[in-house]
Image (tube, grey):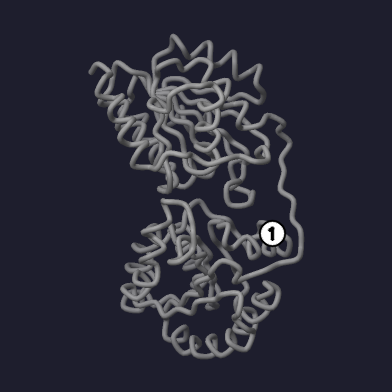
Amino acid sequence: MDVTKFIAQLRDIGVNFFTGVPDSRLKPLCNYLIHTYGISKHHIIAANEGNCTALASGYHLATGKIPCVYLQNSGLGNIINPVASLLNDQVYGIPCILIIGWRGEPGEKDEPQHAFQGKVTLELLEVMDIAFMVLDEDTTCQDLEDKLTEFQELLDSGKIVALVVKKGGLSYEGKVKYHNENRTPREEIIRHILDVVGEDIIVSTTGKTSRELFELREQNGQSHQNDFLTVGSMGHSSSIALGLALHKPDTKVWCIDGDGATLMHMGAMAVIGAMSPQNYVHVVVNNSAHESVGGMPTVAGNINFVQIALGCGYKMAYSASNLEELDKILERVQCQEGPIFMEVKSAIGSRGGLGRPTKTPSENKTAFMEYLRSVTQ
């Protein structure tokens, strides 16, 4: 279904506010919203999906109108609490339309982190008492109109409904190009980090960061045993790294994070600062974009990560705008006590033909834990 017709039907029932976390299945929707509304009071890309539902609640309280929240199905975990304890019709009864990108749908080849989530997506909606419609490439405008008419009674009674979008369920002919003013490729940033880490432990965030780390190790003829490539669980790599740093205090632990992931669960930075592991280096590659799902913007270009890190209790915090500045910081942190924070500003984009890890998550875990056992306490 063409997304312009899709949005027009939502407007027909009074929807004029959208907030969400971008998803590749919903790229046509995300591109349309950016093209039409940009980032404004009508469209907000939030830090995480729970943040979205709370924003949607505030919008409804202020206007009495129906908000729309979009998300990948992996984000359902982030909305269960506010959906159950805030929006639910047995609590405040705040109506909302969820648009959910269905990754890992049964029968479709997808990444391993999506397999189980995809299998239980519809079951989760049923358990949460959320009526839903599945959209695929054969869904017509009449199909959607009929379902929205059916949903109207539920929305009027303060319930939540969902539109679950399969691959190809939405389309958009418009082109939106995402870019920033930075020129340094993320892969080169990771390459320069690898030049200094030696046998240190690396935890890399989900998406292209882990893919690039894996390929760089392959290019260098290096083992992958030092690296934990986080798949799924966006926003949690820094906490995984903290758990490792606290229990392997004689080994330096590097977390290579992204700005979208850091924003999603920024409270982890406060815990890292409070626990103060001396062997922890937290690198945030900041391209101010959700690049792995299309390049839609984050708010990371508008905030000062260095001040945030210092406020959270990191011992040192730096920001680099290019590889020369990065190399000077990398040399400096070798002899400094952590936790250390490093922001490195990056361009949006990756090289063509970027591959994916050839090891399964289970194989990565086994090799990584075997290596950790060889590291002294």
Is 106 placed above or below 235 here?
below
Q: Is residue 64 left or right of residue 230?
A: right
Q: Is residue 338 left or right of residue 5?
A: left
- Tell me where residue 236 appears, x and y as whole percent: 39, 42
The residue sitting at 66% across, 56% down in the picture is 39
Q: Is residue 115 above or below residue 166?
A: above
In the picture, which quadrant includes the C terminus? top left
- Say which element carries label 1: helix
Rendered location of residue 310, percent (x, y): 46, 27
Residue at the spot x=64%, y=33% of the render?
346
Residue at 43% across, 24% down: 223
**Residue 135: where, in percent of width, then height?**
55, 76
Q: Give the total number of marks visible in the rendering.
A: 1
For the point 28% across and 18% down, the residue is 375
* Residue located farthest toward the top when viewing the structure as drawn: 335
| Type of the residue with mark 1 | Ile
Say which of 19 and 3 sits in front: 3
Q: Position of residue 2 (x, y in %)?
A: 69, 74
Q: Please state which of residues 73 and 227 is positioned toward the viewer in this rendering.
A: 227
Identify the residue under disc 1. 34
Above or below 109: residue 287: above
- Residue 181, compared with residue 253, is above or below; it is below
Q: Dot 1 surroundings within 10 Å: few (below 14), some, or many (20 or more)?
A: some
Quadrant of the image containing the N terminus: bottom right
